[in-house]
Amino acid sequence: MQPGDPYPFQDGRNPWKRFLDVRPALADTNIQQPGHFVPKHDAVAYQRADSAYNDRLWRGTTSVEAADAEGWVVSITPSGGWLPACIAGRTGVGMSQRAQSFVLDSVMNPFNVIAPGKRPRVTLTPSLALKDGKPFLSFAVQGGDTQDQNLLQFFLNVVEFGMTVQQATEAANINSNQLWLSLGGTAVKDRVPRSGSILVAGSTPDSTRRALEAMGYMLSYAARTSGPINAIFFDTLHRSLWGGSSNHGEDYGIGW
């Protein structure tokens, strides 16, 4: 599946059309492109690599959600290493390891090529949801490229499926690595999209597993399918706060 072209639908002209024309060759697993690694569908290798990747992923970030009686609320996700320290020339600007999220090839992502005036794509997703102009949820998670995925599923579990904030933090997630990973490894081959590869909970019923496999997905399983999720739900009806913390790490809630 290649990127679409939304520009004709907004009366615009796609400035990246030339990249769309050459991208399909990069997705052809029968062709080894110079400078590009073509992934092989090896579930065992994926699981072995994911185990080491997730170990680094889920312990390298923290998150804090806080609210008080006066209505102040924050959601923050501190992350990003600074060792070894590197200062950009004489600017005094420190360069963190987040620069690894840039790419050098415009065909891969023309918006994210390292250049003056750019900032790296980051995985951090501290979130606030408002309802009727007032705080509804404060929520965040640790977990690299799975943060957007896990938090969207958490949000939908609350607003669409009627879970309490605690139930939603503990609920199983589906994770996809069908994208260029932002983190993990120093070689291009460690960060390539894994076509068809998804992580599901070990508790997934056999019927669901068979249905996914019939659709062409390559499944891996784990008891823990997201990083630690922490959240606060604002119960405006009863003027109370509900805290939720998963059991996926060193996460917990405090009220006083």
Image: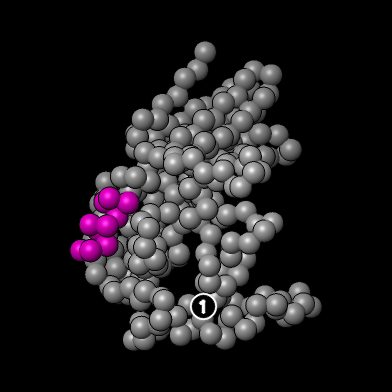
Q: Is residue 125 visible?
A: no
Q: How is the image coloured?
A: one colour
Left or right: where 223 falls relative to 61: left
Which residue is depicted at the point 27% across and 46% down? 223
For badge 1, the amino acid type reads Gln
> In terms of secondary structure, where does tag 1 sit?
loop
* Front residue of this view, candidates 95 and 139: 95
Q: Position of residue 189 (x, y in %)?
A: 35, 67
- Residue sitting nearer the eye, 182 or 13: 182
Q: In the rendering, at what x and y percent does residue 160 appear?
A: 53, 49
Which residue reaches farthest top? 256
Q: How packed is label 1: few (under 14 Cα within 10 Å), some, or many (20 or more)?
A: few
**Residue 156 position (above or below residue 116):** above
| Count of marks placed on residues | 1
- Relative placement, left or right, of 39 versus 73 is left
Task: State the image quarter where residue 216 is shown.
Answer: bottom left
Left or right of residue 164, residue 196 in this image? left
Who is closer to the viewer here, 182 or 177? 182
Q: Quadrant of residue 75?
A: top right
Q: Does the magenta segment cover residue 47?
A: yes
Residue indicated by mark 1: 2
Range covered by the magenta-colored residues: 44-53
